[in-house]
Image (spheres, grey):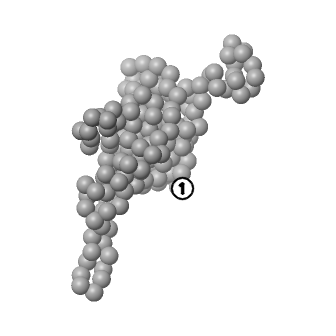
């Protein structure tokens, strides 16, 4: 886990999910570049992901973190878990997110765990289906979290009181 030390940045949790080395073969040999998938959250229901590419690993991580901070989304949390079961989809990746009772913990694999830890989720059950490509799994998890709504939001959209739900 990578954490920033700047004063204004210290409120964010940065997780490096995956670093990939890519080579390009040219006349003089191979040229290496790096790409990093980074997840950034505040631990309070806001999370974002970014892909940074550069000639050096630290620069790729920095670029990914900046992109993730720009693209943060808000996640409705209910007592440390999500309001209802949802399946997030991105590309060939599907991630099932299921609310869990208090004390269950964070039952999730690598890429999904990074997103949920950064968002501040403490109790949840997850399952990765389809691809296990970390970039697609992170995007599918965030898409699933974006689809969540609280009881108040659903009642307001339907135009009925919360008690009738």
Q: Is residue 80 visible?
A: yes
Specify whether residue 111 is in view: no
User: Which residue is pictured at 44% across the width and 43% down the height?
Assistant: 48
User: Label 1 crowding class (10 Å Cα cut-off): few <14, some 14-19, many 20+?
Assistant: few
Percent x, y of residue 108 = 39, 37
Q: Residue furthest top?
A: 163
Which residue position holds label 1?
91
Residue located farthest toward the right when viewing the structure as drawn: 159
Picture quadrant of residue 58: bottom left
**Which residue is drawn at the image coordinates 31% and 63% (left, top)?**
54
| Residue in the picture at 30% in, 80% down | 25
Q: Relative to the observer, which residue lies in front, 138 or 86?
A: 138
Res 12 → quadrant: top left
Name the quadrant of the C terminus. Answer: top right
Q: Position of residue 69 (x, y in %)?
A: 41, 43
The quadrant in which the N terminus is found is: top left
Which x, y percent locates residue 40? Answer: 38, 41
């Amino acid at each position: 886990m990578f954490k920033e030390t700047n004063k204004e940045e210290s409120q964010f949790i940065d997780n490096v999910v995956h670093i990939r080395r890519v080579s390009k073969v040219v006349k003089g040999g191979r040229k290496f570049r790096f790409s990093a998938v980074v997840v950034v959250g505040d631990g309070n229901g806001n999370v974002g992901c970014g892909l940074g590419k550069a000639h050096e690993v630290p620069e790729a991580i920095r670029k990914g973190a900046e992109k993730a901070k720009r693209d943060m989304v808000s996640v409705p949390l209910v007592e440390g878990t999500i309001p209802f079961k949802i399946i997030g989809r991105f590309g060939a990746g599907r991630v099932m997110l299921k609310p869990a009772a208090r004390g269950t913990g964070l039952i999730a694999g690598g890429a999904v765990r990074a997103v949920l830890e950064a968002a501040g989720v403490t109790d949840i059950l997850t399952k990765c289906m389809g691809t296990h490509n970390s970039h697609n799994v992170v995007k599918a998890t965030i898409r699933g979290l974006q689809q969540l709504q609280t009881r108040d939001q659903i009642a307001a959209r339907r135009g009925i009181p919360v008690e009738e739900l």
